[in-house]
Image (spheres, rainbow, N blue to C red):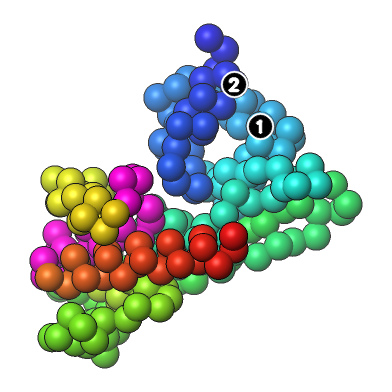
Amino acid sequence: MKLESKLQMSLSKRADHVVLRRELARLGGKSQLTEAIKRLIGEGRLMRLAPGVYARTRRNSHGAVELAAPPQVIADEVLAKTGRAAAIRRVDSGGGLPKFEAKFANVLANASAGGVPPRRKRRAAAFKLPSDVAQLPVKDVSTYVASLAAAHGVVFQRTRLDDFAEAVTRLAGDDERLDATGKLLASLRKKSVINGAQLARLMTNHMREQKNAVRSVR
């Protein structure tokens, strides 16, 4: 099977919308992968947001190429995968295919030998979680979770806790795989930023919000 076909198959099976080059590295050699990605971008099947960071695309009802998800969803996934907050902005493409780019904020500093950077400590201290889970947000949950993760310098890494988080989504009546917000919640639990009850409530609130958004569109 040609590398481009492998790439297309890999993209079609993904539940997420942001693709990192390193996630595709196993499919082929470096130069071959570069050329295959360029072809997919040229065909409007993939969009480059930043070096090594791409977004899946789709065709709208008029046949035009657009991002496969709203910019904020893309931004949340970029944060979850790279640990860097970004604004997804449309840029002038000169009349060709639409083009978006990720405008990154400052890179989240890594913990040094001296411990957690002071700026992150201040952000984390300022972000107080309510002890009563009933007070956790029911709207804009993904933004809340992304901000909480950024304040504590948390990024998504697959662990067994993801299985628990996915079980919570099933209890909420959804069998789909975790989205970027769900993955961040699993990572926040792993780092003990949130407890089990907070994870369950935030996950449930997020899933309900997503379902209500889908119903409103219908």
The residue segment tinted magenta is 174-196
Name the spot of residue 49 as percent of width and height, x first.
Answer: 60, 52
Name the spot of residue 73 as percent of width and height, x first.
Answer: 50, 61
User: What residue is rendered at 48% in x and 20% in y?
Assistant: 28
Residue 40 is marked as 1
Q: In this rendering, is residue 209 above or below 137?
A: above
Residue 4 is marked as 2
Sequence-first tag of 1 and 2: 2
Residue 9 vs residue 94: left or right?
left
- Do the residues under discs 1 and 2 have CB atoms within 8 angstroms? yes
As helix, strand or loop, the secondary structure at mark 1 comes to helix
Assess whether residue 183 is covered by the magenta stretch.
yes
Distance from Cα at disc 1 to Cα at disc 2: 8 Å
Label 2 neighbour load within 10 Å: few <14, some 14-19, many 20+: some
Residue 8 vs residue 78: left or right?
right
User: What residue is rendered at 74% in x and 61% in y?
Assistant: 91
Residue 32 vs residue 160: left or right?
right
Q: Is residue 104 something one can see in this rendering?
A: no
Assess whether residue 65 is covered by the magenta stretch.
no
User: What residue is rendered at 65% in x and 43% in y?
Assistant: 58
Total of numbered circles in the picture? 2
As helix, strand or loop, the secondary structure at mark 2 comes to helix
Name the spot of residue 51 as percent of width and height, x first.
Answer: 56, 48
